[in-house]
Structure formats: C-alpha cells, structure tokens
Amino acid sequence: MGESPVRSGKPRGNLPPLELYVPEPKYRPGDKVDYSHLEIPEAGKLARPDEACEASETWPLTTDMIRVLGDDDKAVGPWNPNLDPESLRRMLRNMALTRAFDDRMYRGQRQGKTSFYMKCTGEEAISVACALALAGDDMVFPSYRQQGILISRGYPLVDMINQIYSNRADRLKGRQLPIMYSARDYGFFTISGNLATQFPQAVGWAMASAIKGDTRIATSFIGEGSSAEGDFHAAMTFAAVYNAPVVLNVVNNQWAISSFSGFAGAERTTFAARAAGYGIAGLRVDGNDALAVYAAMEWAANRARANMGPTLIEHFTYRAEGHSTSDDPSAYRSAHEREEWPLGDPIMRLRNYLIAIGEWSEEQHADMDRELAEDVKAATKEAEKNGILGHGLHHPFHTMFEDVFEELPWHLEEQAEQAIRERQTKWPEWKE
C-alpha cells in the first residue's frame, strides 16, 4: 500500500518547503541604531475630519501620523488645539511632576523602601495630555504607565506613595501590587496585572453609561503587546456592535517587556489600522507630541459624547527605560535606541514650544524642576511616616477579612479571631 502524501511530510512536486517566520528586532545590544526606516511625516500635514464624520474617513489617518509640533518648535496644522499659554504651562508642569515622581519612586525602590516600581519615562505626554482633554468625571481604565492621569486630576501624591509602600495609610490596604492604584472618586479604575482586561471593562462601562442616558464616556489604555490578547478583540467587537461611547488607546512604545512590537503585529501594519477591520474610527498620533495627543483625545472624546461611537488611537512613542525595576533593557536592546529616537523627549518638545512663543524660559523650567523635586520629596517623607517595606507599619491584621462581604460570614469571623489569637500567642507584644 502506498504512503499517504498527507502523512509523508515529503515535498509535493515543485512546491518549496514551508518556512516559519519569527519576528526579529532590528537592533540588539551593541548594534548601531538607524531609524531611517521609520516614516515620520511633517507636522501639520494631515487633515482633521469632522468629529461626526463616517468612520471610514479616518482610516487614512491610521497608517499616517498626526503631528502638531514640528522640528522648528512651532505648532502647525488643523490638529493644533490652540491651547492658551496657561493650559500649556499646566500640561508641562504635570508632565514634569510625573517624571519627578517616577525618579523619586525609582530611587525608593532601589533603597528597599518598596518591592517594585514602573516608570513612564518618555510617555508622559500620553497620560497627561489625555487627562486634560477628557472631562474630569470621564472614567479611565488604565494600564500601569498612566500615573500622569492621577497626577493631572489632583490625586494626592502622599496617597499614591502610601499605596506604593503598602503601608498603614494605603487606601487599598495592601491588596494591590505597588503602582496598581485605584481611585473611584477620581474616575480611575483599579489597575490590573492581567494584560488587556481593562479594555472590555471600559467598553462595558461605556455601554452602561449609554444605557443609563449618562453623559460620561470611558477610555482605556493598553500597550501594543497587550493588543495581541483576546480581550483586545472582544472589546473592539462589543465597542463596534453597540457603538459604545469609548476611546480605546494602544500605547505603542516599541517594547512589551523584552519582546519587541513585531510579535504583536507591528511589522504588518500599524495598530491603529485595526480600527478599519472593525468599522470604527481610528487615529495614529505622535505620542511624544503633547499637543497632538491632546487634539486626538479631544476629537475622539467629542465624537463619543455625540453618539458617533468608539475610536481606536495608537500613540507612537518609545519606552525610554526598563519595563520595570525588575528589568534590564540592556540585555535585549541597543543602548543607543533611546538617544536616537527620532520623536525626541515629550517634555523637552513642549518646553521648547513654550519658549519659542515667549511663554516660558529655561530659567523658569529649571526653577520648576527644583520646586517639583522638593514637592515630591516632602510627599515621600510624609508617606514614610506611615511605613515602608519591611518595617511592620501596615494595616491592622483583621482588615484582610474586610471589604469582600457586606456582612462577614460566621466562618470568616471565626477564622479572623483564631488568626488574631495565634498571632498574639507568638508575639505577645504585638497589638492591632
């Protein structure tokens, strides 16, 4: 009996053998960096469609890039939001404060005051500009680099640090990893360590807002690596089908921990281009241009509020430092990537624009940086009074049984009492 060609594994006729393609980043440690393959359009060249346009009118924007700030430090084009100088200074200050906060918390982690921290260096424009473009009561479903939203909404720095230290003043009572904040009264949904879960949650919240006839919209952020998760596609489907008033953001910072963006599909097309497959509006924006980010979010938020449906925004940026304090990026990417990144530093770009229009100076900027560093230092010292990692200043032991049931079941009451008795037996000096 002849061998089945299906099972033989042998080539058929003149067909070449199949090959598996595995994405590979262009630069590895020690390599010289050349970003000439990136297409960076001139600022101001893209048209700004009406916010009530058909979704298909935005699709050409998903493979291009919205830019407002040019290399000459001028703001140009129809996407220029024309913000007044005071709003621009506020935006710059919030971005600088976010960076100062990151630097201080990174140092605290290295000093053993907390177990873990994640910086957003190079991505400050995305969270801060989006926060200022949204209404204060719009609901945000963040990822773990949107600390700038909380800061822009005026959330107390001391409370943020208490959460990072998981101390006795931590509003979350030590139940979340450091940096996974939650602030319902600031419209900030709890951060999840499970990738992309916030996307369908944001869509569901937006659908509920529409069902109730509310005026608040939702927005959510994920990294480009998380867009390969199934939750991304579930969210896109529900958003498209039910015309949910939501803005979905993909922060393409080129790296998902140690895996570059090609593993999430970046080599095929842009992440914003996925909007066309679902029939919704899409925008691709220079994520290091605070004015472009503001304009894109404002456009998408106004569209959602006018019942014109969801928008997918890709923020094209670069993760300037490690994924977290547990990561060493020099092990998997060239050390020259950050300094050669063609879109520059978002804080410096906005600073230079303000200087160019005569509304800022290098001296004012230096004074602001010093002031913000002192503000963060003072907040840190205040939070440290409530405890740091390993110093025993934490929430009372019985709180581990709270906040799950409205009325604690009898068997948990017994467990709580037993646990307290055993702890007092081992450590007689211990008190709640």
Image (cartoon, helix red, strand yellow):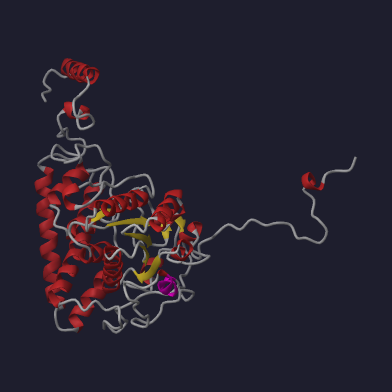
Return the residue nearer the eye: 196 or 169: 196
Image position, residue 136 (x, y; %): 17, 59
Which quadrant: the N terminus? top right
Return the residue nearer the eye: 328 or 76: 76
On the question of residue 318 being in view, the answer is yes
Q: Is residue 138 above or below residue 421?
A: below
Asked if the stretch drawn in magenta spans residue 59, the answer is: yes
Q: Which quarter of the picture shows residue 24?
A: bottom right
Q: Is residue 339 above or below residue 360?
A: above
Total marks placed: 0
Image position, residue 288 (x, y; %): 31, 70
Image position, residue 311 (x, y; %): 36, 64
Outermost residue on the right side: it is: 1
On the question of residue 103 being in view, the answer is no
Q: Is residue 259 left or right of residue 323?
A: right
Residue found at x 14% / y 47%: 159
Residue found at x 15% / y 18%: 424
Image position, residue 91 (x, y; %): 19, 68
Residue found at x 45% / y 70%: 33
The residue range painted magenta reads: 56-62
Q: Which quarter of the picture shows residue 241?
A: bottom left
Asked if the stretch drawn in magenta spans residue 119, the answer is: no
Which quadrant: the C terminus? top left
Q: Is residue 10 left or right of residue 78?
A: right
Return the residue nearer the eye: 189 or 260: 189
